[in-house]
Amino acid sequence: MKITIIGAGNIGGAIARGLVRGGVFNASDITCTDLMQANLDRLLSADACFNVSQDNPTAIQGADLVVIAVKTWRVEAVIDEIRGTLDYERQSVVSVAAGIPFERLLRYFTKDAEVRPALFRVIPNIAIEVSSSMTFIASCNATPEQEKVVVDIFNQLGMAMLIKEELMMAGTALASSGIAFALRYIRAASEGGVELGFYPDQAKEIVLKTVKGAVDLLLTHGSNPETEIDKVTTPGGITIRGLNKMEEEGSTQAQAEENHYYIGSIDTTCSLSNYIGPASQTSSVKISIRLKQKDASGAEVYTPLISPRLVVGSQDIPIVFPRIRGAYGVENGTVEVVDVEKDAVIASYPVSFFPVG
């Protein structure tokens, strides 16, 4: 089986290296493309047998599976580039770009035809770098055999789970974002260990072994976390006191600080063609995305969501932010797409916020 990965950055490069490390694929079975030669050089330094290219249409020829692992705002441009070369009957396509639903992907792929490829959305977490990712997969227009192939591939990089597309956002929160929550606990517990007298490296090692032990217990016994907690708690003991304190105040200072924010979300698309006009096919514009709110005094407050970047005028811009931190006590805001050079608002979208905790 041959795989082409478009985008050899953090995620794309981790997928390529992980598949070879798992022993199922040879590096010579994998072709990677990237606009940045430095990313391709890093791959070759890991294994000189990787095939590398900066020509996407040529690179996908002969591939059984095409993985699109570029930034969200580049997905449409990449699909436009490869659409005419893809063999929809033979090749399956995987998108690793968060926040682009099948409805939008299919629109990108069927601009010139009604034929639909077998499509997969894949959401890994950063542990894919060490082949220990919890990866969610949703499929569209795929056979059970095609689904099994993709699930088996990503099982080489940790654990893969086939789910419905409507659960992708929940999976992102639980695993992709969830790994950050676990890491924050490890940091906080390690700092606590230092305060108790351990050296920093000792404290971190203790916490890591403790967390690994907790995971091993649950995986081995298949038990509920509370069942294992009950084994180490005694009435009036230090463990139950600590657990009660965690319930009262949150397990880290970061969780306490979170209560000072309201949270909102948005998942939509901004088209630049109406803003630019007939020249949108050949023009580009530098845009940024920001949140606008009014504080208690009525003053407008702006929070950057995406820094300025150049996008093609014909491109649909995904406005996907599952977790936006807003000002405390402010229940409304507006997400704005801004023409940076003209300081003009291209589009704006209302967002509702709700308190956390």
Image (cartoon, helix red, strand yellow):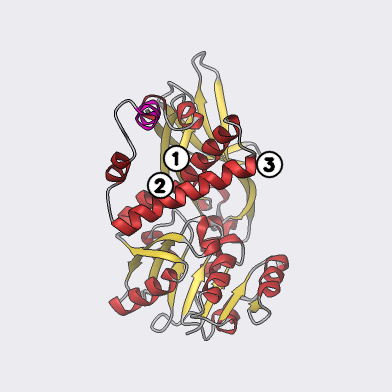
* Figure quadrant of the C terminus: top left
Tell me the magenta residue range.
237-245
Residue 177 x, y percent position in the rendering:
46, 47
Q: Regarding mark 1 in the picture, which secondary structure is present there?
A: strand
Q: Regarding mark 2 in the picture, which secondary structure is present there?
A: helix
Mark closer to the observer (3, 1) = 1
Residue 144's image quarter? Answer: bottom left
First-in-chain label (3 vs 2)? 2
Q: Regarding mark 3 in the picture, which secondary structure is present there?
A: loop
Mark closer to the observer (1, 2) = 2
Residue 132 is one of the magenta-drawn residues: no
Q: From the viewer's perspective, is 59 left or right of 164?
A: right
Please name the predominant secondary structure of the magenta segment in the image. Answer: helix
Residue placed at 37% from the left, 52% from the top?
171
Residue where numbered disc 1 is placed: 323
Residue nearest the viewer, comparing 245 with 282:
245
Mark closer to the observer (3, 2) = 2
Amino acid on which the number 3 mark rests in the picture: Glu
Q: Do the CB atoms of the residues marked 1 and 2 lie less than 8 Å apart? A: yes
Mark sitting on residue 341 = 3
Amino acid on which the number 1 mark rests in the picture: Arg
First-in-chain label (3 vs 1)? 1
